[in-house]
Amino acid sequence: MATLGDLERAVMDLLWKHQEAITANTLRDLLSQRTSEDNVESRPLAVTTVLTVLSRLEKKGLVERERASRPHRYRAVTSREEHTAELMLEVLGSAPDREAVLARFIGTVSAGEAQTLRELLGRS
Amino acid sequence: MATLGDLERAVMDLLWKHQEAITANTLRDLLSQRTSEDNVESRPLAVTTVLTVLSRLEKKGLVERERASRPHRYRAVTSREEHTAELMLEVLGSAPDREAVLARFIGTVSAGEAQTLRELLGRS
DNA sequence: CTTAAACTTCTACATGATGTAGAAAGTGTT
DNA sequence: AACACTTTCTACATCATGTAGAAGTTTAAG
């Protein structure tokens, strides 16, 4: 229940970037500009496509919409950091070897991040 | 490229549990016993099914096989902890807000684990 | 209030991943 | 050579996702 497709991901990234709730049309426009170096010019998405994706994201609990405003406005339910942290937790899982996994994990973060983590954890 | 299906997952769990490389047949037998409370009795998987899954896992780089021994023997390429830690890294991503994500993440682990983390990180 | 424009929901299809396994091909053994 | 066992090919069902037209609903004019 965790992984998002490319388009879903792109939509979430945009929603996370906007604190305000935005409409499907706005999203479609923003998505059009997102033509990375690789992508060689492709006609913009249909609004219905964006709407479909938004519905699916809503069903997944990642997005909520303001049905009140006429063109519905959508916003991310949780912040990007929150969502990512949750995902990490989900991956970490409830196995009995959580600490072993954490040990490996810690070994991979950069020195700077390790320092940040120390500060976050406070002195023992 | 991260998520595994249920069967793939079950196979990996078994391979991770066995330090020694094992055959597809052995795996099929082990998988048969894994009839959780919910699962109401279902005929065991065909060996070819297990082999197919193993091939896919091999292609994904999670499994390697000893082609030497006649019934090929399979083993996990990395340990479970290593794999999970890698997945967590992948989820954490290379975004600029890594630290923010880590902060959230740290906030969720248990006190005991936080202590473990402090020890792993060493004194500042 | 009647319509057309705008918006939302339904329905649909293509593609790729995964579960599942029979058919076909390969290999080692008497 | 013929058989038993193993591996590889081929195949299909299902589900998630990308994509969007068709149909239904709501709003804004006129």
Image (cartoon, coloured by chain):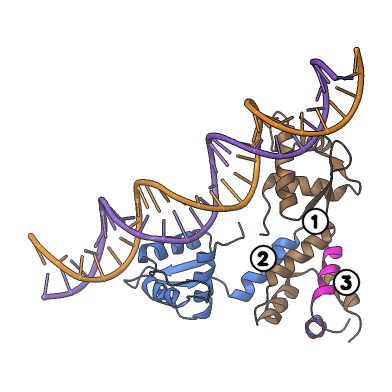
Chain colours: A brown, B blue, C purple, D orange
Real-space Cα separation, disc 3 to disc 1, in angstroms: 16 Å
- B107 falls in the magenta region: yes
> In the rendered image, is residue B121 in sight?
yes
Quarter of image, res B121: bottom right
**Same-chain status of marks 2 and 1:** yes
Q: Quadrant of the C terminus of chain B?
A: bottom right
Instruction: Specify the subunit that label 3 lies on.
Output: A
Helix, strand or loop for disc 2: helix
**Labels 3 & 1 near each other (Cβ < 8 A):** no
Amino acid at the residue labelled 1: Ala
Residue A55 image position (x, y, % from top left): 73, 45
Mark 2 surroundings within 10 Å by alpha-carbon count, few (fewer than 14), some (14 through 19), many (20 or more): some
Residue A118 image position (x, y, % from top left): 87, 77
Residue A40 image position (x, y, % from top left): 69, 32
Left or right of A120 in this view: B72: left
What residue appears at the point 68 percent right and 52 percent down from the top-left corner? Answer: A4
Real-space Cα separation, disc 2 to disc 3, in angstroms: 21 Å
What residue appears at the point 81 percent right and 50 percent down from the top-left corner? Answer: A64
Quarter of image, res B118: bottom right
A50 in relation to A13, above or below: above
Helix, strand or loop for disc 1: loop
Label annotation for residue B87: 2
Real-space Cα separation, disc 2 to disc 1, in angstroms: 15 Å
Magenta residues span B95-114
- B5 falls in the magenta region: no
